[in-house]
Amino acid sequence: GAVVSQHPSRVICKSGTSVKIECRSLDFQATTMFWYRQFPKQSLMLMATSNEGSKATYEQGVEKDKFLINHASLTLSTLTVTSAHPEDSSFYICSASTPLAGDTDTQYFGPGTRLTVL
Amino acid sequence: GDSVTQMEGPVTLSEEAFLTINCTYTATGYPSLFWYVQYPGEGLQLLLKATKADDKGSNKGFEATYRKETTSFHLEKGSVQVSDSAVYFCALDSGTYKYIFGTGTRLKVLA
């Protein structure tokens, strides 16, 4: 149980285009989803926290107009990188948690999406 | 603010060697503590967790004990295998449901 999927696993796009990444909780309802960014050989940096049906909360220094997050249902959150540039190339990982269940503080991570902007 | 400090890697061991990866934390209150493992090109998988002092988390031969007095949550395994080669992350949650991650420790096990 507690499986989180991401799509696509890899994407290459041209500079200036927008890219959408989907994060789905497959076998549980995720009241909260998190989006992280990971640079090569580094730790995860939390970008934003999204709760179903409300606006995402962005961490300091993350541009909300560039990284659009939508959490439209209890099983789906999307991250759209708008007007992508080469410096946006990174590994993006989502996670989901469900404080409604007994395991209130565990996050379950997706497999990640490798974004390369040319 | 809250923080997690992990030992720097890479850690290189021979198969069947004993593993310890140190993790210490600073936090207000009583955080939950986690170890996650990341295999190359993949996301993070929960390895084990502990939610209160003296709790021991264990999974797949790995263990970690929540030590409040030393603010530590060191990861141990008695006999590592080549398949354990990965990056290991220590993390805490202070009750905000947001994780603070350590920098990760890369483990390489040689046959």
Image: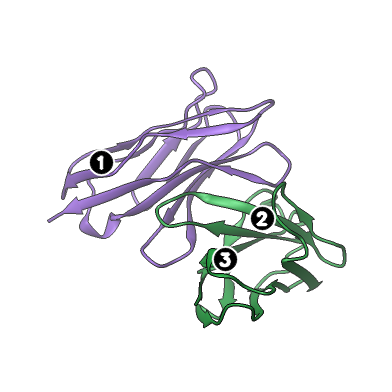
Q: Residues within 10 Å of mark 3 (few under 14, many from 20)?
A: some
- Residue A19 percent across, percent down from the top left: 64, 79
- The residue shown at (53%, 29%) is B25
Chain that the image shows in purple: B
In the rendered view, does A6 fall on the left or right side of A58? left
Mark 1 = which residue? Answer: B78
- The residue shown at (51%, 57%) is A38
Q: Colour of chain A?
A: green
Q: Which mark is residue A88?
A: 3
Indicate the colouring scheme.
by chain
Q: Earlier in the sequence, mark 2 or mark 3?
A: 2
Q: Is residue A52 above or below residue B93?
A: below
Q: Which mark is residue A47?
A: 2
Q: Secondary structure at mark 3?
A: helix
- Residue A39 percent across, percent down from the top left: 48, 56
Foreground pick, A55 / A104: A55
In the rendered view, does A51 fall on the left or right side of A112? right
Q: Residues within 10 Å of mark 2 (few under 14, many from 20)?
A: many
Cβ–Cβ below 8 Å for labels 1 and 3?
A: no
Q: Determine the chain carrying the residue at label 3.
A: A
- Label 2 or label 3, whichever lies nearer to me, is 3
Q: Determine the chain carrying the residue at label 2.
A: A
Residue type for callout 2: Met
